[in-house]
Amino acid sequence: MNGDALRAPRVPSDTVLWVPGFSVKKPGPKGEKNRMPEVIFPGPEGRLEGRYHAQRDKDAPIAIILHPHPQFGGTMNNLVVYNLHYAFYEMGFNVLRFNFRGVGRSQGEYDQGVGELSDAASALDYLQSMNPNAKHCWVAGFSFGAWIGMQLLMRRPEITGFVSVSPPANMYDFSFLAPCPSSGLIINGSSDRVAPPSDTHTLVDKLHEQKGITITHTEVEGAGHFFENQHMDTMIGAVDSYVRRRLTETTR
């Protein structure tokens, strides 16, 4: 799973501003994509490090993006996570991605998913505190982050949609999705050797049996676990189309 260590270019920033409970780094004046402050916010085991990208619209929807396994090089700068972050921003969301405990400058130690779920809940609390008027709340996760995101979905009824990228259904138990409280998108690659498509199909089939929600499944032909090369654009395009369609609907 060394591919989890794929990193995107870091966003330039300069001065650090300290505010009670968190810090913000002022971005450089090089365009909208650089206006993504570095934030430090309280977590269950100390400070958590993140990147926050805000819209000008105070009523903009919110989304958090969860990264892959911390013990296999997963960070918030993973290329899939980075691209998901910008995809949601381009769709008009206020977006937060962050490092789980023990990763980067986030305090604490890896906790088998239990602590990481608490980290995700703290991140959502922080995001909601800055955006109290948001009418839509989404969670997106990649690999291990998809597993954490689906657990968060079960615990936070305000989440109205999810995107689960390369969910490792062969490694982790997803039976807690009974029932799954919200419609969402599950997307994987047909050549995934980390989380085999057959296990993803089994997960999707079980969710399709549930009533009251619609689970959309997209499989990118030829893509591996990390959606290398041209497959990244295909995956992000599918996410963009799905989320934009959902935002025009009134049901969960």
Image (tube, grey):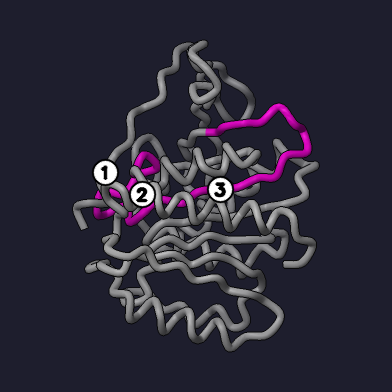
What is the three-letter code of the residue carrying label 3?
Ile
Instruction: Classify 54 as above or below 155.
Output: above
Which residue is depicted at the point 41% across and 46% down? 81
Q: Which numbered disc, 2 or 1, marks the residue that appears first in the sequence?
A: 1
Q: CA distance from mark 1 to mark 3?
A: 19 Å
Which is more foreground, mark 2 or mark 1? 2
What is the three-letter code of the residue carrying label 2?
Met
Q: Please report the bounds of the magenta region as a residue range.
A: 52-78
Determine the image quadrant of residue 110: bottom left
For residue 146: magenta?
Answer: no
Q: Position of residue 165 (x, y in %)?
A: 43, 60
Which residue is depicted at the point 77% across and 42% down? 132
User: Residue 64, which numbered label?
Assistant: 3
Disc 3: CA contacts within 10 A as few (<14), some (14-19) or many (>=20): many
Judging by the rendered image, the residue that carries numbered circle 1 is: 6
**From the viewer's perspective, is 80 left or right of 196?**
right
Q: Main secondary structure of the magenta part?
A: loop
Residues at circles 3 and 2 in contact by the CB criterion of under 8 Å: no
Judging by the rendered image, the residue that carries numbered circle 2 is: 232
